[in-house]
């Protein structure tokens, strides 16, 4: 069967009450769906995206050369089988692909929010999605699946809307963002803020589209270090040198340098720097235990079946962070979870790249 | 006995033939000594410094509030005992603390070299030191000790001047810089180059002294991630938040963010950005096997006793990199080495911070 890719934007006029006490009003949520909703609406799978991802998780638009970010995972006969499931993936609030974010026009001024945009949290992102599903008359889903920041959303759903999903599948993520991840985000944030072209958010969007923001490019390079592992970098690049440059030229380049340059400068042409500041902030302040006495107290609310999947050499969200969740679940007597540490050398991005290493686990979790 | 700290600068008019085929001429080397040279000159210990270190390894100048970078390690009764040894530490060429580097005046133009400075390698740094020791009429030394880039120098000495040192002690270093270390350097380099105040090396030195170079500050922040470990960051910072800032303020700060800001912006007031570009380049192209068929062939030249010391959670120079040297030595039948992996959670900077965890090894290696 075809993927049946559909893209929509829903507009909400009721205020969204944020964790900070502030309000977002009005707001839009852009989302995609794949497959078909069954009659009793029992086949919904929610997919949540990571920091720089979007609602475009699978399929190919016209004129597009690269498919959605989890295309190998979502589709007919794939791990998240669209012959069976109706898949919804929405762009998080704070992002820059259609849902309301810092570059959206603030009502009623019709000027971009920029720094006037409120800080949103992972909990707020989840709340907005919950309201979207209400609008779609979906009040319970089969599963919520996500990796990295998507996994944070999945876990936050499990705690704050405990009766909403039968199954929660969280990959390559954590229960609370740790200082090393905050540190990588800090490098990117500082690099954006220091870029004179950023102009405290009053940057020229046309300039950005043309040449990008070098500060964000550098920040993204640091990010790429955290997405890989020592092992995968050695395998991918070793000490290979671009032959056209002399070893003793100050600006001669190793392959790993070319890789970072390409990915850094390319990134800055398609992602918004203000959205980067706001979403990394959301990641930094993410902590499942906030509002509870402890992580254990938070986890006591969970009624969904939890599948926790970590990746052995993930340097951004270390495998022991998921293990910590599993250990807490065990302590509080929850028997309705599985924890798997995937044997992968790739690093954090394994959840996007080495699908074959964990798709069986996700299939089992979804269908079991 | 007193440390007997002495600082000197030697001027050399003969050309230094560099690995690149280029020439440095004339050049200066600034160095410090501690302790006293004995009659038969058999008590010399050479200490080599890391990327941003200097010849000022121990003791306190007048008006100085912070001692030399290895003060806990060098002195009367300390691991490198100045009652016994005559210690020499010189500033590497390419640096910015007295030895000739990119901001030195180019003869005969009396203008700073800037980008006209030749790329120097670790091998060149070692060669220049060897020439300095010749000038000092020191033709053989008891030991050469260094960590990080200092360890690279120690190992390079062992291979290129095999009859020069009785003992080589290399800590927290590698036989060839790996892509992750190059990647961290790349972030710093790009960040410096993109800073409009850098002006392709034509920056205003006064401006730098006053406010620093924000691009270098950001690059240094990335560096600091590589100097620590996940474990030490968790212990040092956890998710502690600066109370004066609200969690939901976009620019509110976690402790780890304050740490990076402080160290990043402070660094840029005392280190030269061109020197940073040149020395990270030297680190990137460092490979003991260059000019040989293999690392094993290079290591066959070694006649000194080698002490290889790695740190378990070093994320910059992984412990297995030193193990690889040990394995090659074993394969070629060298029985004159020891390899120790220090049980430390601190990360790369353990060689500067957790002296108590390895000083016994260094003492044993020096005195054994």
Image (cartoon, coloured by chain):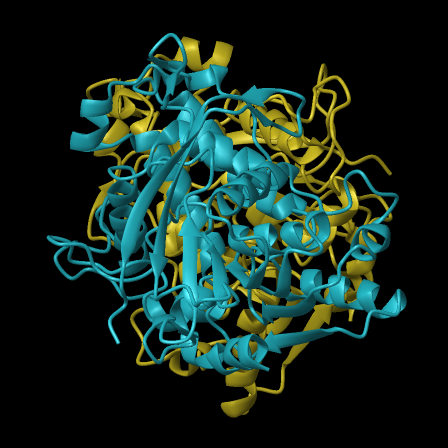
Chain colours: A yellow, B cyan
Q: Report the side of A121 relative to B140 (left or right).
A: left
x, y (%) of residue B240?
A: 28, 66
Judge by depth and name the residue closer to the eye, B327 or B39: B39
Q: Is residue B152 above or below residue A204?
A: below
x, y (%) of residue B87?
A: 42, 62
Q: Examine the rendering and report whether any part of residue B166 can be seen.
A: yes
Q: Report the side of B86 relative to A302 (left or right).
A: left
Q: Is residue A180 above or below residue B265?
A: below
Q: Is residue B234 above or below residue A87?
A: below
Instruction: Check the picture and name the quadrant holding the C terminus of chain B.
Output: bottom right
x, y (%) of residue A173?
A: 55, 60
Residue at 18%, 54% in the rendered image: B61
Judge by depth and name the residue closer to the eye, B103 or A214: B103
Q: Is residue A213 above or below residue A184?
A: above
Residue at 15%, 62% in the rendered image: B243
Judge by depth and name the residue closer to the eye, A7 or A340: A340
Instruction: Check the picture and name the quadrant holding the N terminus of chain B.
Output: bottom left
Q: Report the side of B60 relative to A29 (left or right).
A: left
Q: Examine the rendering and report whether any part of residue A218 can be seen.
A: no
x, y (%) of residue A327?
A: 55, 84
Q: How many marks?
A: 0
Judge by depth and name the residue closer to the eye, B277 or A261: B277
Residue at 83%, 49% in the rendered image: A78
């Amino acid at each position: 069967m075809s993927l049946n890719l559909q893209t929509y934007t829903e507009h909400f006029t009721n205020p969204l009450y944020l964790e900070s006490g502030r309000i977002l009003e009005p707001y839009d949520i852009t989302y995609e769906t794949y497959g078909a909703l069954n009659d009793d609406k029992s086949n919904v799978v929610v997919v949540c995206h990571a920091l720089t991802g979007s609602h475009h998780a699978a399929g190919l638009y016209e004129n597009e050369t690269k498919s959605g970010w989890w295309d190998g995972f979502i589709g007919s006969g794939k791990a998240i089988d669209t012959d069976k499931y109706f898949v919804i993936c929405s762009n998080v609030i704070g992002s820059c692909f259609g849902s309301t974010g810092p570059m959206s026009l603030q009502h009623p001024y019709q000027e971009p929010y920029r720094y006037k945009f409120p800080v949103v949290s992972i909990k707020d992102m989840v709340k907005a999605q919950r309201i979207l599903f209400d609008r779609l008359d979906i009040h319970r889903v089969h599963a919520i699946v996500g990796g990295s920041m998507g996994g944070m959303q999945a876990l936050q759903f499990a705690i704050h809307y405990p009766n909403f999903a039968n199954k929660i599948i969280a990959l390559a993520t954590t229960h609370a963002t740790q200082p090393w991840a905050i540190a990588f985000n800090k490098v990117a944030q500082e690099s954006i803020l220091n870029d004179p072209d950023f102009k405290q958010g009053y940057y020229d969007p046309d300039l950005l589209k043309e040449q990008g923001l070098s500060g964000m490019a550098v920040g993204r390079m640091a990010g790429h270090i955290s997405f890989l592992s020592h092992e995968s970098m050695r395998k991918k690049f070793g000490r290979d040198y671009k032959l056209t440059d002399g070893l003793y030229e100050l600006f001669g380049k190793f392959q790993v340098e070319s890789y970072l340059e390409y990915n850094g400068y390319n990134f800055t042409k398609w992602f918004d720097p203000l959205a980067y500041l706001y979403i990394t902030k959301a990641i930094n302040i993410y902590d499942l235990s906030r509002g509870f006495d402890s992580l254990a107290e938070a986890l006591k609310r969970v009624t969904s079946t939890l599948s926790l999947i970590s990746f052995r050499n993930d340097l951004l969200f270390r495998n022991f962070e998921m293990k910590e969740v599993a250990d807490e679940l065990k302590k509080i007597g929850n028997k309705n979870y599985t924890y798997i540490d995937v044997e992968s050398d790739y690093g954090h991005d394994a959840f996007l790249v080495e699908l074959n290493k964990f798709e069986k686990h996700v299939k089992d979790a979804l269908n079991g």
